[in-house]
Image (cartoon, grey):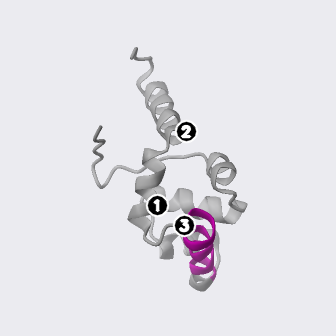
């Protein structure tokens, strides 16, 4: 199965779900959610009122220590392929559309 998304389409994922699935701290989960939503590391750092170096440290922990991925695109692909997140995304889409779909 191939899933295609427009590059500009943000992905909204629960920070709590990210934290539980990947054993992330709240700060790491917030950063991952921001990246999935299409924000840059610099944008996240500014919004979170942390230094860019602190954001980079969180990112290193997410990539190397907690998920085993080395590139942001690989991490996003893994999250999209994860059945938990796929189900959460489908449920969110159905709520936004105001109905349910049968499979």
16 is higher (above) or lower (below) than 29:
above
Circle on res. 75: 1
Q: Is residue 37 visible?
A: no
Q: In which quadrant will I find the N terminus?
A: top left
Residue range of the region highlighted in magenta in the rendering? 54-67
Label 3 to label 2: alpha-carbon separation? 18 Å
Please state the horizontal and vertical placement of residue 49, each as a whole percent of the image. Answer: 64, 74
Q: Which residue is mark 2?
A: 84
Q: Earlier in the sequence, mark 3 or mark 2?
A: 3
- Relative placement, left or right, of 63 versus 54 is left
Q: Secondary structure at mark 1?
A: helix
Which picture quadrant has residue 67?
bottom right
Residue 75, magenta (yes or no): no
Label 1 close to label 2 by CB (< 8 Å) = no
Q: Secondary structure at mark 3?
A: loop
Q: Residues within 10 Å of mark 3 (few under 14, many from 20)?
A: few
Q: Secondary structure at mark 2?
A: helix
Circle on res. 68: 3
Of residues 16 and 99, the one drawn nearer to the viewer in this rendering: 16
Residue 57, magenta (yes or no): yes
For this orientation, the residue located farthest to the bottom is 53
Label 3 close to label 2 by CB (< 8 Å) = no
């Amino acid at each position: 199965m191939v899933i295609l998304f427009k590059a500009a389409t943000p992905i909204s994922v629960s920070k709590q779900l990210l934290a539980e699935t990947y054993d992330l701290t709240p700060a790491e989960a917030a950063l991952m959610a921001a990246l999935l939503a299409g924000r840059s590391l610099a944008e996240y750092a500014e919004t979170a009122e942390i230094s860019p170096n602190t954001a980079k440290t969180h990112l290193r922990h997410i990539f190397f220590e907690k998920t085993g991925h080395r590139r942001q695109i690989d991490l996003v692909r893994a999250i999209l392929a994860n059945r938990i997140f796929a189900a959460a995304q489908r449920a969110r889409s159905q709520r936004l559309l105001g109905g349910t779909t049968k499979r």
